[in-house]
């Protein structure tokens, strides 16, 4: 029951993000081009690549069946033992 509600809300959030993709990208662009951040941290990826990747991800959420599929994919990725173990060094999934 709780997972079903979570999926419904998650789907709505992703849909709203897709609908407001231009606003999200415009706000993030100011951080990407900030000269202070550029000099403090060496970039491993080009800003164009990062913005194109985000734009592509938000653009692909328009269709309903893709949205359902993406929600399931993200939940599975977030709850996988492999990803959780890499996130926290003291993770002991066997307990």
Image (tube, grey):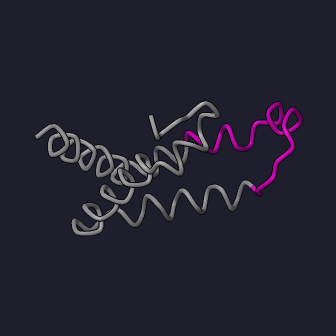
Q: Is residue 92 above or below residue 49?
A: above
* Residue visible at 10% across and 40% down in the picture: 1
Residue drawn at (47%, 48%) of the image: 81
- Residue 67 in percent (x, y) is at 28, 61
In this view, which residue lies farthest toward the left? 1
Q: Nearer the viewer, residue 60 or 79?
A: 79
Magenta part of the chain: 27-46
Q: Can you name the residue that lies furthest to the front here?
A: 95
Q: Position of residue 7 (x, y in %)?
A: 22, 47
Q: Residue at x 59, y 39 (%)?
A: 87
Q: Kindly report the secondary structure that dominates the magenta region of the rendered protein.
A: helix
Q: Nearer the viewer, residue 42 or 59?
A: 42
Residue 57 coordinates in the image, percent (x, y): 47, 61
Dividing the picture into quadrants, the one containing residue 71 is bottom left
Q: Nearer the viewer, residue 43 or 3?
A: 3
Q: Is residue 42 magenta?
A: yes
Q: Position of residue 56 (x, y in %)?
A: 50, 65
Q: Is residue 26 above or below residue 88?
A: below
Q: How many marks?
A: 0
Q: Residue at 22%, 40% (x, y): give it.
A: 6
Q: Quadrant of the C terminus?
A: top left
Question: Would residue 71 appear left or right of 44 to someone viewing this image?
Answer: left
Tell whether position 7 is magenta. no
> Along the horizontal axis of the image, is 81 left or right of 6?
right
Q: Does 57 sit left or right of 31 as displayed? A: left
In this orientation, which residue lies closer to the viewer: 84 or 73?
84
């Amino acid at each position: 029951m709780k997972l079903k509600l979570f999926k419904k809300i998650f789907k709505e959030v992703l849909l709203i993000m897709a609908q407001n993709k231009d606003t999200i990208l415009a706000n993030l662009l100011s951080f990407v081009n900030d000269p202070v951040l550029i000099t403090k941290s060496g970039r491993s990826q080009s800003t164009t690549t990062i913005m194109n990747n985000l734009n592509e991800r938000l653009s692909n959420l328009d269709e309903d069946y893709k949205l359902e599929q993406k929600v399931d994919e993200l939940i599975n990725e977030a709850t996988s033992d492999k990803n959780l173990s890499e996130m926290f060094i003291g993770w002991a999934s066997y307990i």
